[in-house]
Image (cartoon, rainbow, N blue to C red):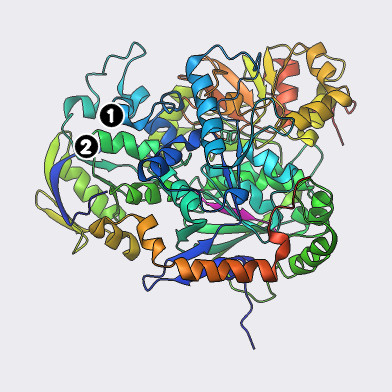
Amino acid sequence: MTLPRTLLDKLWAAHEIVQREDGTSLLWVDRHLVHEGSHHAFAKLATRDTPVAEPSLTFGVADHYAPTRNRLHIEDATIARMINTLLANTQHHGIECMGLDDPRQGIVHVIGPEQGLTLPGLLINCGDSHTSTHGAFGALAFGIGATEVAHVLATQTIWQSKPNAMRIRIDGTLPTGVTAKDMALHWIALLGNSGAQGHAIEYCGSAIDALSMEARMTLCNMSIEGGARFGMIAPDDTTVNYIEGRPYAPTGDDWALAKQDWQQLVTDAGARFDREVSIDANSLAPTLTWGISPDQAIAVDALIPNPAELDEAKAHSIRSALEYMGLEAGQAIEGTPIDQVFLGSCTNARIEDIRSAACVLRGKRSKVPGLVSPGSTAIKAQAEQEGLDKVFIDAGLEWASSGCSSCVGMNGDTVAAGKRCASTTNRNFRGRQGRGSRTHLMSPMMVAAAALHGKIVDVRSLASSETPS
Amino acid sequence: MKGWTTFTGQAVCLDVNDIDTDQLIPARFMSQPRVEGYADFLLHDMRRNADGTPKPDFILTQHPDATVLLAGKNFGSGSSREAAVYALLDSGIQVVIAESFGDIFASNAINNGVLPAVVNPENWHALRRAVSKSSIDCKVDLDTATLCMGQHTVAFTIDEAWRLKLINGKDDTDLTRDYQSNIDQFRKIRYQQYPWARPAAQN
Ligand code: SF4
């Protein structure tokens, strides 16, 4: 009898080429995604004159530096150079690349799934920590650094020690106005920003089963903010239905075989996890960050922590976060005035996110300026077909092209020092959206609600006509 | 990357938790090619005023020759940017000591010969007291996995494969070549067994 195995065990075993005596495994990489930031890795290959082992398994996309306006006439020389370097490197090595004028262009973790490159059972690497997003399909997906990117390019393999297995079970039903983003911020606040370090998370439970594919991606995307390099969900009918018919997805006999193989990608009953956590979906509220780390998050109707009530070690970091954020200890977070909003990033800029924000904003005006950057060019086109661009434009927000944009500000879409931004992104680190910027992470609906009122509000308190079901 | 077994340098303490890689090197500097050096970008916004002048009371302004950093827990969390390690290395910092590290940062550090030394809270505080507000001689030994500051010799933990990698200083890509026949064999079987695992052909 074989021992019951976790999804992690199965995925790991399926990719392990050899295991060294020291316990490190050499793993086969099925898909490798590169972007402008991969220039260090290509430079490493160039110095050794090494070819790319499997160009047909690598895909490039311009996203981190992608201008969101006037993108075909890039004025900034640095940005133009970054994008041209990616195009030149991928072309030189025979790698397919989705440049700014490609209708498939978008944020790397959005276009992988959208194009059917992301499939259950695959091992997926990208030089970006939010590669955990692809784990939503039951893939072994993790972010890597530049040296590792160069290694994958040169060998199509990666050395890795197997992480510990952790399971987060979320049962119940999400209340109205509560989303996968709130699930993510909730568990990260609960366990801390390094709570899952060294672990691969498998999310399961009835609340996870009920999530759409896009919502599952939001949840897995944020795994790294709790310290986990991997986040995954076993594939089911929702997964299969999402993938079917996508450009790079299997077809014909391969499709039939794939569906059969994917049924095995579940944790066996009785399999052991190193750590288990349970959360009740019914008890969740819209959640947002008040501080400078994603675990500094609270329910919208809660109070900002008061360092006076805490031990000195914790109090110190809370005080410095409050100072940076310009907030008062012990006050309600609700009602905090904001200066602008941003709806975008690989966390929350898919079509369902855009629809949910549009639903809140429809027919109304935003009290503050803001930027909406869809997760991909295809999502932008879809939203325009549904007339959602008009909703945002009529509300007074800017409807822009797709890229990482204000998530990281590399393309110049930054938040000015001291300005407070309600944002659908994934990191509220000091200076993440620009030096001195103040970021509050929250769901797209909560960002839309904040735009309407010019301050942080509870999306559940809006009139029912404003609240998407 | 050159291997090393012992290292001697000056340690300073940056007593801040959760120094993420966005702080280690803000995103706006990451378009620079490495040849130009990343030293100026290290902890840029924590270390410098808005006009670029160094903050006089910042520890690395006072001790620019520091090569060992005793830092708060969860060092290097966040973005996978290896440039964070380049910024440390180009500033001469070879060792970072903390209670915990971001997973991707730690592996990037190893790939560049930088030691992420994990110490327990008790030892961390002992070292903290030893460094005080100044700098102190520090000796690191990878053979015994110990480090010594002033009167204190403490053990640090590190993954065994990583410890050997720092000592050998060998590039993974060269090591992997030894397994080329295993890779070829694996690839063949994978596509026989799972033909769907290739990206479907585009017309
Ligand atoms: S949107 Fe943000 S988190 Fe996502 S890939 Fe781009 S920079 Fe990284």
**A449 relative position to B109: left or right:** right
Residue B142, quarter of the rendered image:
bottom left
**A257 relative position to A305: left or right:** right
Q: Which residue is mark 2?
A: B92
In the image, A215 versus A468, the foreground residue is A215
The location of residue A451, given as percent across then percent down, is 72, 18
| Amino acid of disc 2 | Gly
- The span shown in magenta is A227-233
Label 2 sits on a secondary structure element that is loop
Residue B24 belongs to magenta span: no
Say which residue appears at 37% left-offset and 74% top-offset.
A21
Q: Would residue A385 be seen by someone viewing this image from the given angle?
A: yes
Say which residue appears at 18% left-offset and 64% top-offset.
B144
Say which residue appears at 87% left-offset and 37% top-offset.
A469
Quadrant occupied by the C terminus of chain B = top right
Q: Which residue is mark 1?
A: B39
The location of residue A303, given as percent across then percent down, is 59, 32
In the image, A463 versus B191, the foreground residue is B191
The Cα–Cα distance between marks 2 and 1, rounded to whole angstroms, is 8 Å
Chain letter for mark 1, please. Answer: B
